[in-house]
Amino acid sequence: QVQLVESGGGLVQAGGSLRLSCVASGRTFSSYGMGWFRQAPGKEREFVGISWSRASTYVPDSVKGRFTVSRDNAKNTVYLQMNSLKPEDTAVYYCAARRSVRSGSHYDIANYEYWGQGTQVTVSS
């Protein structure tokens, strides 16, 4: 069992930055791919990045150049650095964990076994 706790959300003006953190319980953190998703009201949950390892990360084109994912295995923590924030980035942000050996698209929420409770990010114009 893995428990995930996000933090770092809040209210920020457009153009600002936030760094979200997600701390995982357990001693096998390094064997999990750690993803970030977001969900705005009335919309589906959207993939915004993943860290497979400290050196292997990926963010989709929709946030590339603004969002980066990193992790610190010693701290069981994955980060989502968000720069140049826009009002349309407003959403609840979730981290999620999937075993690295698991197959299936990292865009698909069904391929993640554990989820955090989410943290609200609000970007004002």
Image (cartoon, rainbow, N blue to C red):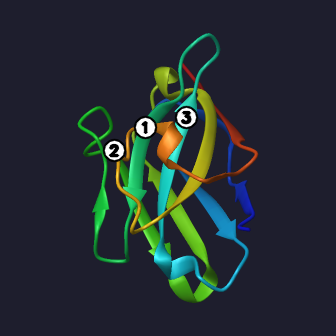
Q: Amino acid at mark 1?
A: Asp
Going from N to C along the chain, the mark reached first, 1 or 3, is: 3
Q: Quadrant of the C terminus?
A: top right
Position of residue 13 in the picture relative to residue 3 (left or right) = left
Whether pointer 1 and pointer 3 mark residues with C-beta atoms closer than 8 Å, the reply is: no
SS of the residue at dot 1?
loop
The amino acid on which the numbered mark 3 sits, given as a three-letter code, is Arg
Q: Residue at x 26, y 43 (%)?
A: 64
Q: Which residue is mark 2?
A: 105
Residue drawn at 37 percent across, 67 percent down? 52
Disc 2 and disc 1 in contact, CB within 8 angstroms:
yes
Which of the pair 9/48 is nearer the observer? 48
Residue 78 percent across, percent down from the top left: 54, 67
Kindly identify which residue carries mark 1: 108
Judging from the image, what secondary structure is the residue with disc 2 in?
loop
What residue does disc 3 label?
38
